[in-house]
Image (spheres, rainbow, N blue to C red):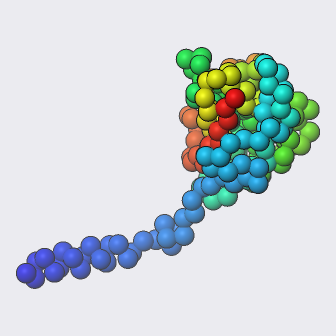
Amino acid sequence: MNFSRNILLMIFILACSQTPLQAQAQEFVVHSTALEEGAPLTEVHVYDGFGCTGGNISPDLRWSGAPQGTKSFAVTVYDPDAPTGSGWWHWLVYNIPADATELVLDAGSQSGELLPEGAVQGRSDFGLFAFGGACPPEGHGDHRYVFTVFALSTVAIEVPREASAAMIGFMLNANVLAKAELTATFGR
């Protein structure tokens, strides 16, 4: 009986002895005024081409709770439901400075003038160095669009300008400290 009581007392003491850092750790999260988890994208974020007639404007994204040691961020938008066998990359932005906490509405324009200084847009599967909105095949049902913010352990990833999304993704995952995701949907 005393043995069991001592074990329970030791478990209680261990549970209460977290370091201040552990007790105050924040969750890495991403938010948007334009997107809601699981909700459909609006026409403003739909591609303008391939039979779609949207505004092709990237949504605003803001994040918080990045882990200690974060040296840069990256953002990707990926459709795992695209009928390609490998999904579809709609947007890749990397080398976002560690002091950045957001990408503003339309930061993914081809000019890139609204991106934080030093940020680079990779080539999407549309072949553009810019945001490409949702545009699933007609009658294919709703697709998921996964907006991921990566907190990275490196100041910059080194890839060629024409690097594929797969190569960029490999480098992001090789240096990731944490990820925050928001998934929207769209079908036509």
Residue 86 location (% of width, % of height): 57, 20
Q: Report the residue at 67% width, 58% height from top.
A: 64
What count of labels does the image hold? 0
Say if residue 155 shows up in the picture.
no
Picture quadrant of residue 106: top right
Picture quadrant of residue 157: top right
Q: Is residue 52 left or right of residue 63?
A: right
For the C terminus, the quadrant is top right
Residue 158 location (% of width, % of height): 70, 29
Residue at the far left: name it: 1
Residue 183 location (% of width, % of height): 62, 43
Question: Measured along the vertical axis of the image, is residue 177 above or below residue 83?
Answer: below
Residue 125 location (% of width, % of height): 71, 21
Q: Report the residue at 86% width, 35% height from top.
A: 55
Q: Is residue 82 left or right of residue 162?
A: left
Question: Measured along the vertical axis of the image, is residue 176 above or below residue 129?
Answer: below
For the N terminus, the quadrant is bottom left
Q: Report the residue at 27% width, 73% height from top.
A: 11
Q: Report the residue at 23% width, 80% height from top.
A: 9
71 and 96: which is toward the camera: 96
Picture quadrant of residue 149: top right
Say if residue 29 shows up in the picture.
yes
